[in-house]
DNA sequence: AAAGACACCTGGGAGC
DNA sequence: TGCTCCCAGGTGTCTT
């Protein structure tokens, strides 16, 4: 499930193959994603990919006329088919979109659950989904003071607040679970009740976990052109995510699982207060 | 304004 | 082995 590190690694993986290339054609085999793929996306055809950026979990392919905005949802992945490496493989099941460059390099999008999105943001206009996003967790704007300000009237659990992209982007269930464990904060606590000192530690752990994860993913970049379609990132080394019922790595008590905002949450009742 | 529920979708695992 | 059931997950939108 792609969270910020996976999207960042994807960006780094595909950028060298796409930057400066001309888009010959965008082939949409399955337009029914989270939102229908807009016809206007074809405006990107015959333009140059100027740069590839990331905002939250969105990838932005910038052209002269606007931006192709890609979200991987929870099962989406991108890979590169380069003519000299793996040629022109026919698309397989769930490979919904090809972005074909004039030199025959293909950016191929696969998304079995179709929770992802391909959108078009015309130059000078702004998609509301992008406008509403909160701060980047790895930027200097993401501080304990910012969090305290955003959370001061929030009664929801701190874990849900961390996963709210209007507050801070890119943190999903995995990294929210992990960073709260590392900061030893109980995920159920009301967001407004977390002390500034705890928020400082939490912000620090979030940045640390995301940075480490990007570093690990960066070692597997070559996989973006592997013929088997491996998306180029692997399960990261996680402390407690997905380990309910196992022992806490710190105190060896049994890790508990609860539902917070319809999402399962693992935590250690002994270490996280 | 804030919080909770819900929808979207498919693969995979559990249980029978 | 094969069927059914349930769950996972991101996030916008609708309801309370």
Image: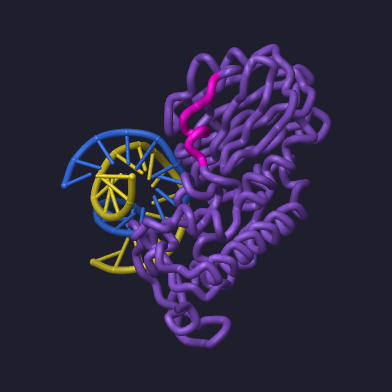
Chain colours: A purple, B yellow, C blue
- Residue A56 is situated, as x and y percent measured from the top left of the image, at 58, 43
Q: Residue at x 69, y 47 (%)?
A: A9
Q: Nearer the viewer, residue A273 or A59?
A: A273
Q: Residue at x 62, y 36 (%)?
A: A59
Which quadrant holds residue A203? bottom right
Q: Which residues are magenta?
A: A125-133
Relative placement, left or right, of A246 versus A138 is left
Q: Is residue A271 above or below residue A209?
A: below
Number of marks? 0
Q: Is residue B6 left or right of residue A194?
A: left
| Residue A255: quarter of image | bottom left
- Is residue A129 part of the magenta span, yes or no? yes
* Residue A240 in sight: no
* Residue B14 drawn at (x, y percent): 36, 68
Using the image, determine if residue A255 lies above or below residue A42: below
Q: Is residue A142 magenta?
A: no
* Quadrant assignment, res A224: top right
Q: Residue at x 46, y 29 (%)?
A: A128
Q: Residue at x 48, y 37 (%)?
A: A132
* Residue A203 appears in the figure: yes
Q: Is residue A131 left or right of residue A102?
A: left
Please determine whether, in this image, residue B6 is positioned above or below residue A128.
below
Foreground: A107 or A187? A187
Front-lying residue, A42 or A207: A207
Task: Give the image location of residue A57, x and y in percent.
Answer: 57, 43
Image x and y of residue A173, in percent: 48, 58
Q: Quadrant of the C terminus of chain A?
A: bottom left
């Amino acid at each position: 499930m792609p969270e910020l590190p996976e999207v960042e690694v994807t960006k780094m993986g595909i950028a060298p193959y796409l930057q400066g290339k001309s888009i010959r054609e965008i082939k949409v085999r399955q337009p029914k994603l989270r939102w229908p793929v807009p016809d206007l996306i074809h405006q990107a055809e015959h333009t140059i990919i100027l740069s590839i950026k990331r905002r939250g979990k969105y990838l932005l392919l910038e052209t002269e006329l606007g931006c192709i905005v890609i979200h991987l949802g929870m099962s989406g992945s991108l890979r590169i088919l380069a003519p000299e490496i793996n040629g022109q493989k026919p698309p397989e099941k769930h490979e919904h979109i090809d972005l074909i460059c004039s030199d025959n390099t293909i950016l191929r999008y696969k998304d079995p659950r179709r929770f992802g999105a391909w959108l078009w943001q015309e130059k000078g206009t702004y998609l509301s989904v992008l406008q509403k996003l909160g701060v980047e967790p790895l930027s200097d704007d993401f501080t304990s003071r910012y969090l305290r300000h955003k959370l001061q009237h929030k009664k929801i659990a701190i874990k849900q607040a961390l996963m709210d992209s209007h507050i801070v982007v890119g943190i999903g269930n995995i990294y929210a679970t992990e960073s709260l464990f590392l900061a030893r904060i109980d995920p159920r606590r009301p967001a407004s009740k977390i002390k500034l000192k705890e928020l400082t530690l939490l912000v620090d752990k979030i940045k640390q976990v995301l940075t480490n994860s990007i570093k690990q993913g960066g070692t597997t970049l070559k996989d973006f052109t592997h013929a088997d379609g491996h998306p180029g990132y692997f399960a990261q080394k996680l402390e407690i995510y997905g380990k309910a019922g196992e022992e806490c790595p710190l105190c060896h008590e049994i890790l508990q699982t609860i539902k917070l905002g319809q999402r399962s949450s693992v935590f250690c009742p002994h270490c996280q207060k």
